[in-house]
Amino acid sequence: MEKNQKIDFVISWVDGGDPEWQAEKDRYANQGKRTVKSDSSQTRYRDWDNLRYWFRGVEKYAPWVNKIHFVTCGHVPEWLNLDAPKLNHVKHSDYIPKQYLPTFSSHPIELNLHRIKGLSEQFVYFCDDFFLTSPVEKKDFFVNGLPCDSLEESPLSFSYVTPMNNVHMNDALFTGMHFDRRKCRKDNLKKWFNPKDPHAFVKNTMFSLLNDSGCFGFNVHHLPQAYKKSTLNEVWKADPEWLDLASSHRFRDAGDVSQCVFKFWQLCSGDFYPYNKRKFGRVFRSELEMDALCDAIRTSKYKTICINDADEIDFEMARKQVNEAFESVFSEKSAFEL
């Protein structure tokens, strides 16, 4: 049955160098006074010019994918083949309710993914800094119809001032409003204490001593995330007010929740298949791990990686190194390129 199941990929992308998009973003960023700090930093939007390698990686390592939904505000790379059979270019206006547009925040884009026309029930969401670097199978994302995920309790920590601190806290509060932590653990003991992931097993065992009923957070590995479309619908039905508030903010805002509420929902409801995400992929901090990152690309050490951008790098040099590593593995054009 799993061989015949349809699994779509969804990737969101922005061309940070598009002058029209920049002008519109700046115009909205300068309108009025925001009472909480919002995130509109340039680092979040700059282009590593490696999107073509994402498509080449999917074609090479996940040829079974049913459809790729490429989500943008409307612009596309000049090299993209919009007639590729498996490609569906999705504009924000195609699926995000018009009262939330235009948006320059990832949160409305991600919180409304279930509204994409033709999206399969089972899908995997990619940010544009997630890449496939080794062959993957359907069972890497879904088993018995359940999204593969890793449940690892992790109390919130705030190391520096950023709007995302508030968002992470809101995600935990949102989850705690709808689930009793003790009951969730009792109902899904084998998933909370998963021997496939020794690190998470030890942490969850330790935190089980804290017998509070409220959620205090889960580790988010920042890798491709498997979801069921019905889960997103269920969460919207359960708490539309907070999701509506987050979707209404044009920039990341301290009052937001993120797509993590969907991940936490499926973890707390037990609607997932436990696996070890550490063996599946790794996040690389570009300012500290450039050599290790390029080596992982060239050697296919992980099935998937995340390239975490940072202000404290020589961006042009880093981009050159990373793209040379990608080119050494993905030198041929994919069907998604002209």
Image (cartoon, rainbow, N blue to C red):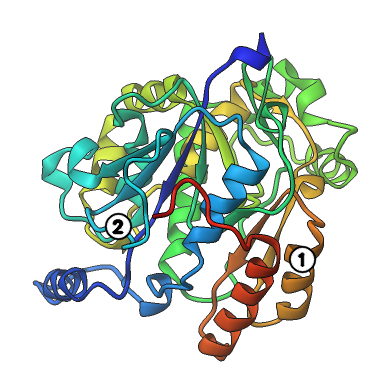
Q: Position of residue 316 (x, y in %)?
A: 52, 88
Q: Is residue 217 visible?
A: no
Local secondary structure at mark 2: loop
Q: Position of residue 232 (x, y in %)?
A: 41, 28
Q: Which residue is mark 1?
A: 298
Q: Would residue 94 appear left or right of 329 to someone viewing this image?
A: left
Instruction: Indicate the amino acid at tag 2.
Output: Val
Residue at screen point 47% across, 27% down: 178
Q: Position of residue 225 (x, y in %)?
A: 57, 40
37 w.r.t. 67: above or below:
below
Where, by quadrant of the figure, is residue 264 drawn?
Answer: top right
For the residue pair 83 and 170, the one nearer the viewer reads as: 83
Residue at screen point 17% across, 47% down: 100
Q: Which residue is mark 2?
A: 76
Query: Mark 1 or mark 2, which has the lower sequence index?
Result: 2
298 w.r.t. 64: above or below:
below
Instruction: Indicate the amino acid at tag 1.
Output: Arg
Residue at screen point 71% across, 79% down: 290
Where, by quadrant of the figure, is residue 233 drawn?
Answer: top left
Where, by quadrant of the figure, is residue 244 drawn?
Answer: top left
The quadrant in which the C terminus is found is bottom left
